[in-house]
């Protein structure tokens, strides 16, 4: 009987969960930037071998919610934790640790738990050792020293996760690596480029949505709307004489063409959706699930 199950990746913002998901799957599914809170919704990546299918759930970072969007992000993380067959806490040993927030999240599941001490290639050894002790003694979890970026320790961790999976038939076709449609990943690649190009509030106020996707054309025609919260942000993105939006389009198109393996004609529009991160109706329209207030 094969082993199949959900492995939920959780952790504080910028711990390297998305980089680790991409390393496990062998493809770039989750966007990755140097900024915290890049992942806004859970991303499902599927790694299938001869007799094992691991379904990885990359989740938004555990944080203190300051608006409805962040409430939605936390809710998605907690739902994914509750659904897990195996929990994998990703920790940056060199960063501050919110022990209470982590333990509260872990309490939503009784699944076997492991800890990936990430970024060991740059973290001070004394801090890595301290987190090893914390994982074992405080969490009762088996820790692994890894570098998701360099691939160090990934296979040993994969072996341990495999042994913890339940025996069950595969849930997805063997050639699938993701459950979300291509449109989702295209929009995320544009949003990743916004994160890379802009600072301060712009990346956290911009959400991308694919409006048109004509794959029967050559090049593939893709129309994407970038929603921002204020007219001033729209002006920054568009730039003088449209220079900003052209550069954003060029950089995004290169990523999308690499992802699709085809030539792409990318049309970008920027629209103002006043205060969308704080409005339940707008968030719902954009596809976010916002939990009801207690």
Image (cartoon, rainbow, N blue to C red):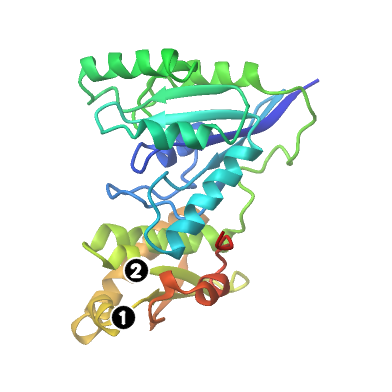
- Which is nearer the eye, 225 or 99? 99
Mark 1 and mark 2 lie on one chain; the one further toward the N terminus is 2
Check the image and report above or below for 201 versus 160: below
Which element carries disc 1, helix, strand or loop?
loop
Instruction: Indicate the quadrant containing the C terminus: top left, top right, bottom left or bottom right.
Output: bottom right
Which element carries disc 2, helix, strand or loop?
helix
Give the CA distance from mark 1 to mark 2.
9 Å
Residue 58 at x, y percent in the picture: 51, 42
Check the image and report above or below for 192 versus 175: below
Q: Is residue 243 visible?
A: yes
Residue that appears at 33% across and 60% down: 193
Q: Please give the label number shown on residue 230.
A: 1
Residue 284 at x, y percent in the picture: 57, 71
218 left or right of 31 in image? right
Check the image and report above or below for 146 versus 32: above
Which quarter of the picture shows residue 153? top left
Residue that appears at 22% across and 26% down: 122
Which quarter of the picture shows residue 180? bottom right
Q: Is residue 262 visible?
A: no
Q: Give the residue number, with chain letter if any, for mark 2.
A: 205
Residue 19 at x, y percent in the picture: 40, 38
Do labels 1 and 2 touch, CB within 8 Å? Answer: yes
Q: Residues within 10 Å of mark 1 (few under 14, many from 20)?
A: some
């Amino acid at each position: 009987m094969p082993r199949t199950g959900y492995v939920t990746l959780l952790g504080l913002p910028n711990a390297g969960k998305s980089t680790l998901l991409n390393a496990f799957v062998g493809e770039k599914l989750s966007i990755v930037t140097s900024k915290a809170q890049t992942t806004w919704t859970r991303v499902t990546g599927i790694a299938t071998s001869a007799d094992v299918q691991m379904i990885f759930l990359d989740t938004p970072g555990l944080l203190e919610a300051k608006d409805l969007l962040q409430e939605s992000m936390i809710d998605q993380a907690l739902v994914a934790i509750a659904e897990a067959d195996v929990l994998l806490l990703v920790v940056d040993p060199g960063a501050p640790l919110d022990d209470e927030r982590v333990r509260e999240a872990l309490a939503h599941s009784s699944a076997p738990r492991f800890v990936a001490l990430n970024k060991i290639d740059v973290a001070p050894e004394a801090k890595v050792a301290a987190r090893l002790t914390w994982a074992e003694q405080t969490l009762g979890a088996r820790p692994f020293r890894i570098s998701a970026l360099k691939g160090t320790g990934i296979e040993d961790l994969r072996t341990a996760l495999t042994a913890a999976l339940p025996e069950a038939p595969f849930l997805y076709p063997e050639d699938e690596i993701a459950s979300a449609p291509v449109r989702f990943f295209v929009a995320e690649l544009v949003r990743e480029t916004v994160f890379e190009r802009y600072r301060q509030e712009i990346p956290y106020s911009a959400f991308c949505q694919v409006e048109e996707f004509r794959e029967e054309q050559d090049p593939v025609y893709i129309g994407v709307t970038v929603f921002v919260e204020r007219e001033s942000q729209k002006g920054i993105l568009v730039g003088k004489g449209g220079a900003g939006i052209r550069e954003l389009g060029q950089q995004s198109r290169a990523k999308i063409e690499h992802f699709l393996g085809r030539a792409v004609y990318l049309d970008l529009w920027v629209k103002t959706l006043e205060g969308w991160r704080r409005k339940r109706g707008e968030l719902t329209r954009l596809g976010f699930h916002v939990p009801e207030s207690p």
